Every structure is written in structure tokens, then in C-alpha cells.
Amino acid sequence: MRLVYLDNNATTRVDPEILSAIIPYFSEHFGNPSSLHAWGRKAKTALRTARQQVQKLLNAKEEQEIIFTSGGTEANNTALLSALAFDPERNEIITSRVEHPAILSLCAWLQKYRDIKIHYIGVDAKGCLDIEAYRRALNPKTALVSFMYANNETGTLFPIEILSRMAHEAGSLFHSDAVQAIGKLPVSLHNSDIDMVSLSGHKLHAPKAVGVLYLRQGLKLQPLIRGGHQERGRRGGTENIPAIVGLGLAAEKAFNTISKDNAAIAALRDKLEQGLLALDSKALILGDREHRLSNTLNIAFENKDSEALLTFLDQSGIAASSGSACASGSIEPSHVLRAMRVPYPFAHGALRFSFSRENSEEDVSYVLEQMNKILKDPRSNRDIL
Ligand code: PLP
């Protein structure tokens, strides 16, 4: 059976070249970068190289703006908690209803236990932010605005340049959870109004549990993880050198191939989209087709059951995901699809296919072949289940 992995927004395979390059950092180059001997110096050099590779991908001004973390979730937590630490007069956060739980659950906690006021800005049917509502929410008490760069479920892009400028005009800091964007889109932080950015290694063919918080030069950080002097005292704990080396190499590879990869990936995604619409002309494309990650397709089939569709796909060797989550025993459309007010008969039949540079035309033809069978199978109907 053919195996087709189309769940790259969940995680990506570690690039085989990167895997070979990092193995020596578990064996012969196992030193601690804080040690002064040759083993330590080797690790320290590798750490610096990785920092410079990420700096280049982000087009950041200084290598010290790159702080290695254990992933996107830690970077997001650090950004929000740190931003709240500086000005007691500013105790409000603005974010959107469609953020990842790595932002939303922290915001819920801050509201409940730290009495922080959170403004959740809504989106329209395409997942685009209500900019007027955002403008109204900005006020002299806003400590931080945090908007995602690209939505993990629909791929919809927020206009980060405009949103960050608005935050600065109101005297607030601006953070972006760019976990789904970095490595998929060219990003330039030098001369931008973006103060903090989170990214995650495993979304760009690097290992899991490594990420970065970009912190604009001159901004202070309140560390989330206190300990040693690592990362200039901004993130304690011995650095995960093999994973960091992998992230650096992944950043370098993304920097060199982003435009070429994007064009090829978009062509595959569009071919799948057209093919699925030909199978079911009433299917809805969820997200903003004009401003969307080139690797993401979220498509909703009326009166179909996404869990059943995914099971059929899985049995055919195809990995995709749905826009639903199991909440108290029943399958509910995700908070993103609810915020977009996707009509009920469609929201339950949404599938997300997310591509990477490892996918091929043959993958798309195979998925279309299988989807043709699956959509005709009565067991995929919501009513029957
Ligand atoms: N933010 C977004 C938008 C994501 O898609 C994810 C992962 O799915 C995260 C944050 C969490 O990143 P990590 O898995 O590195 O903690």
C-alpha cells in the first residue's frame, strides 16, 4: 500500500540529511557548550552557527535576538509572561479567537489567576481578522498584542506588518506565533514592528522539542525558565545541542529553497484542491484562498463525518487531519471553525491536508483516487454514524 503523509502542519519528518548531520552531536561531539575544553568548544561553535542560521532565515539584526527554547509552546509562554512583567499599568493582552492552544490556554489561565484582561478578536468566514475590532481594543493598558502569522488549521495569513504597526502606535509590544509560517514563507524581522516571534523546529524538518523565541534587540526578557547563564541568562538549562544543530540546518535549508519549494508545494496543493472540488462541487474551501500558506488545504464536505473520512484515509495509508476535536465525548468542530462560523453540516466534514517538500504528484493522484472511493461510501455520511 502507498503511504502518503499530508499532515505536515502537525509535524514534519526530520530531513534525512539533517538527521545524518546531527548524529555526531550525540556521539563524538557530545560536549557541553559551557565547558572550556575542546569538547565544550566544539558544542559552543555549533550553537553559534545554528543561531546565525536562524538569524539569517528571520533576517534578524543580531544573533543575540535568537533564544533557543524547547519549542513553540515554551516560546509563546515566555513571550506573554515576559511582556506582562514590565509595566504594572499595562495589564491587558489582545489576541485572536483562532490562536493555537499554546496561546489560548495560557490566556485563559492569565485571566483566571492573574486577573489579566484578555481581548479575543474575532474573524470572518474566511478566517480573516476583524481589524476594526482590534483597533477598538487597543488602549493605554495593552501590554501585548499576540497574533499568529498563519493559522495551523486553514493556513490563513494575518497581515502581521499592519497589525504590529498598530500595536506600536498604541505603545504596546507585539508578538507573533509564527510556528506555521517560519520555513514556509519568507519573513524579515529587521526593521519590522515585530518585537517577539515564536517558531518550532518540528514544523520545518528539524527535530521536535526545539524552537526559538526571537526577541528584538534592546528588549528585556523575564525568563520563564531560570537556571544557569545559558542563552545569556534568558533561558536556563543545558542546551539541546543535537536538536539546535538540526534547527539551524533546517533554517539554512529553508532559506535556500523557500521560493522553489513553495511554488512546487502550491502546485500540488492546488491540484488536490481542484481534484476534490471536481469530486464534490459543493465542498467548501475553508480559509482565505488569496492569503493562505501554500501548503495547506482545508476542505469541508457537506453531511460527511470527518472522523470517518480520516479513518478511511488512514486505512488507505494516507495521513491527514480534521478540524474537530473530541470535547467531552462528542466530536465538536474546532474553535477555529466555530470562530469562522462554518455551517454545521460542513464543519463536521472538514479535512486538512498539509503538504511539505517531500510530497509528489503521485501522492496527489493516489489521494484523489482514494477520496473518490471514500466519498461514495455511505459509511462516510454523518447521518448514518
Ligand atoms: N503554535 C502553533 C500555531 C502550532 O501549530 C503549534 C504546533 O502545532 C504550536 C504553537 C506548538 O509548537 P510546539 O509543538 O513546538 O510546542
Image (cartoon, rainbow, N blue to C red):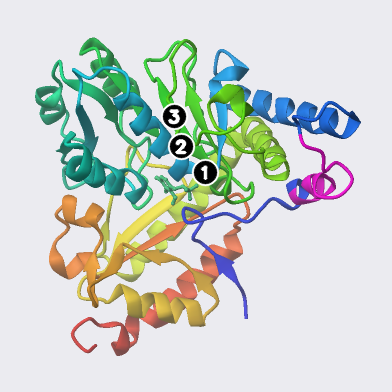
Check whether the beta carbons of the residues at disc 2 and disc 1 lie within 8 A of each other: yes
Earlier sequence position, callout 3 versus callout 1: 1
Q: The residue under label 3 is which amino acid type?
A: Val
Identify residue for label 1: 71
Is the shortest distance between ligand 1 and the CB of mark 2 under 8 Å? yes
Residue 101 percent across, percent down from the top left: 33, 50
Quadrant placement of the C terminus: bottom left
Identify residue for label 2: 75
Residue 197: give its label. Answer: 3
Answer whether residue 30 is magenta in the image. yes
Q: Which residues are magenta?
A: 19-32
What SS does tag 3 mark? strand
Is the shortest distance between ligand 1 and the CB of mark 1 under 8 Å? yes
Decide if residue 332 is in sight here.
Answer: yes
Front one among 220 and 214: 220
Front one among 196 and 268: 196
Decide if residue 180 is in sight here.
Answer: no
Residue 131 percent across, percent down from the top left: 17, 28
Q: The residue under label 2 is which amino acid type?
A: Ala
